[in-house]
Amino acid sequence: MATTTTDTAQTSPDGQSSPGNRPSDRLTHDDYRELLKQLYLARYFDVRLIKEKKRGRLRGTLYSSHNQEAILVGSLYGLEPMDWISPIHRDMPAFFLKDFRSGWDNPDRMGMTIEEVCSQVWGKATSPGRARDNWSHIGSKSKRIIHSTSMLAGTIPAAAGVVLADRLNGLNTVAVTYNGEGSTAQGVFHEAINFAAVEKLPVVTIIENNQWAYGTPTHYEYPLEDFARRADGYGIPGLVADGQDVIDVYNKVMQAVEHARSGNGPSIVECKTFRAYGHGDHDDDRAEKYRPAEEVEKGRKRDPLHVMKTRMIEMGILTQEEADKHPAEGKGASEVTDADFPAEVSEYLSRGVNFAVKAPLPDETEGAMWVFKEGE
């Protein structure tokens, strides 16, 4: 059931190849341009917050998604608005990228606004979490986002539960969960996948294999090369995607989504990528010691922006001059500037940052809110 990352044919979850029938074959040139803009937006979100932290305008821990943007953008792009997602700490852009195809500023979009997400990062009263966390411990039942927790893989049973409930209510939705490769060793991962497989629940589990579980390399986590082989024990598809190629991620996740929506049950999609920085910004200095410099250089060389631009040039969608206009790829947070990004991208996020900076803190009387059961 293993799949390759070749672009010459689609390998479906049942292992059958269908040349020229990849999900990406249905994408238009406008879709490709939108995907590129979303890659820019996810990257700019990351580097802008790192800069804000260094300027002393932001407190708390940051968990960078730098170099992993193709996983989020590619997996989210083909979902239906009513589908569920379950992001983790390295997936903050997912909260506002969900249902982005419906319009960045569409008030009816099934995703959080950039103002809400930035308010969460800044810990303000306008955040979904009301300043109880400055990062990803948020969610929205109305927007179909399962609340993130620190216990990675712990949201897979929740995802199985919400799609089971939707099934009982006559809905045909899919839940996409995001997990680090290290979380696949947890008992809850296997219990939840087994339950989803037995009940044929439409749960797509994405494994973000960025080569390191905090400070533990993959060869100390699992004896096989592909974490997607975890799927074999449950008789479900296990696909492997190039996590640096947004189109390959899109193809593999859409195969799994279509498989699930057709009533065939869950899949696991492993996206091979590389974590550009430490586990969090508190770990950056330590990460320079436990990760060899040549490994980091190699891991960051295939920048998702560069991979997508190269593909678009080859397809005649983008000219070399257009590709060179905003050269954010290959640059770290300290090197990149606003000029390296399209103006609409920097303006969109700047709006969220400025809103969050000016927003008020919650009143002290809210300290016990959501802690104890409140009256009617």
Image (cartoon, rainbow, N blue to C red):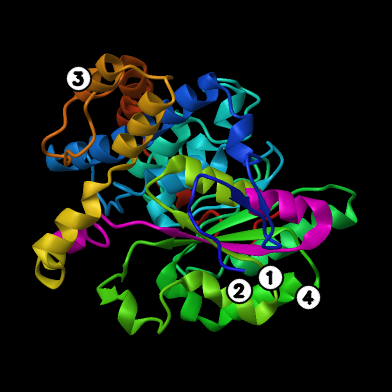
Q: Residues within 10 Å of mark 1 (few under 14, many from 20)?
A: many
Report the number of numbered marks: 4
Contact flag, marks 2 and 1 (Cβ < 8 Å)? yes
* 179 with respect to 321 (left or right): right
**In the structure shown, which secondary structural element does the residue marked by tag 3 occupy?**
helix
Check residue 264 for magenta coloring: yes
Q: Which mark is residue 339?
A: 3
Q: Please provide the residue range marked out in magenta.
A: 255-284
Separation of disc 4 and disc 2 at Cα?
13 Å
Amino acid type at circle 3 is Ala
Residue, disc 1: 236
Say which mark, if any, is on residue 198. Answer: 4
Task: Tell me where residue 124 appears, x and y as whole percent.
Answer: 38, 39
Marks 4 and 1, Cα distance to the nearest angstrom?
Answer: 10 Å
Question: Which element type, helix, strand or loop, lies under badge 2?
Answer: helix
Closer to us: mark 3 or mark 1? 1
| Three-letter code, disc 4 | Val
Which residue is labeled 2 in the image?
231
**Numbered disc in front, either 4 or 1:** 1
Secondary structure under the numbered disc 1 in the rendered image: loop
